[in-house]
């Protein structure tokens, strides 16, 4: 798993030098009305209500440029382009994530339990993780595009 650790460690180098982002993991908490004023209705539904966008509806599903995917709620980096793959599901999919920036919990909304995951800083819902992903992790982090903000690498 050495390669995975290398890949996970490389996220900061993909950001522009003047990114101005804060990587602190101090919790970001806001009242529902405040989130509602800051987010689009679609992003609010996913991030704060654990909604799911329609498959194939978001352009990040086919985003292939190098760069970093941030939480759309608080701009914490969650994935890089090197972690992304085409799962064919219609949702942006990743085989791993930036360590320490994601939290998980069991979700019993459907008959069978699924593992929900969210941004560790603002607790914004991102998607669900499954065990049918590609090597080397075998994981499929199935994300809502609307819950992310993509920052392309400077060319
Ligand atoms: Zn967040």
Image (spheres, rainbow, N blue to C red):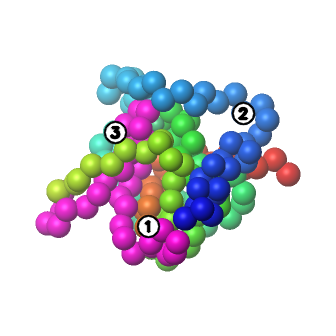
The residue carrying pointer 1 sits among few (fewer than 14), some (14 to 19) or many (20 or more) residues within 10 Å by Cα, namely: many
Of the pair 124 and 129, the residue shown nearer to us: 129
What's the residue at 45%, 24% (across, down)?
Answer: 26
Q: Earlier in the sequence, mark 1 or mark 3?
A: 3
| 118 up-or-down from 18: above or below | below
Compared to residue 35, the image places residue 76 above or below, namely: below
Is 92 one of the magenta-colored residues? no
Upstream in sequence: badge 3 or badge 2: 2
Q: CA distance from mark 1 to mark 3?
A: 22 Å
Q: Residue at x 37, y 44 (%)?
A: 103
Secondary structure beneath dot 1 equals: strand
Residue 105: x and y in percent read: 27, 49
Of tags 1 and 3, which is closer to the observer? 1
Q: Quadrant of residue 22?
A: top right
Residue at image mark 2: 19
Q: Position of residue 41 (x, y in %)?
A: 41, 41
> For mark 3, what is the residue?
48
Where residue 34 sits, quadrant-wise, is top left
Q: Is residue 93 above or below residue 29?
A: below
Query: In which quadrant is the N terminus drawn?
Result: bottom right
Residue 23: percent from the left, percent from the top? Answer: 58, 31
Residue identified by numbered label 1 = 140
Q: Does mark 1's beta carbon lie closer than 8 Å to ligand 1?
A: no
CA neighbours of label 3 inside 10 A, class few (<14), some (14 to 19), many (20+): some
Residue 58's x, y, as percent?
52, 59
Does 129 lie within the magenta span? Answer: yes
Distance Cα–Cα, label 1 vs label 2: 28 Å
Name which residue lies at 50% across and 33% down.
Answer: 74
Secondary element type, mark 2: loop
Q: Give the residues drawn in magenta, as a range.
A: 109-138
**Left of 10 or right of it: where is 142?**
left
141 left or right, relative to 48? right
């Amino acid at each position: 798993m050495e390669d995975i650790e290398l890949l996970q460690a490389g996220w900061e180098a993909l950001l522009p030098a003047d990114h101005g982002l804060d990587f602190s993991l101090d919790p970001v908490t806001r009242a529902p009305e405040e989130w509602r004023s800051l987010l689009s209705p679609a992003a609010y539904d996913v991030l704060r209500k654990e909604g799911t966008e329609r498959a194939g509806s978001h352009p990040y599903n086919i985003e292939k440029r190098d760069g970093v995917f941030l939480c759309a709620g608080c701009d914490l980096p969650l994935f890089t382009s090197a972690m992304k793959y085409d799962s064919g599901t219609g949702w942006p999919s990743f085989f791993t994530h930036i360590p320490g920036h994601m939290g998980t919990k069991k979700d019993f909304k459907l008959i069978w339990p699924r593992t929900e995951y969210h941004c560790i800083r603002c607790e914004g819902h991102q998607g669900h993780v499954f065990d049918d992903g590609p090597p080397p992790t075998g994981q499929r982090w199935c994300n809502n595009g609307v819950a992310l903000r993509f920052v392309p690498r400077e060319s």
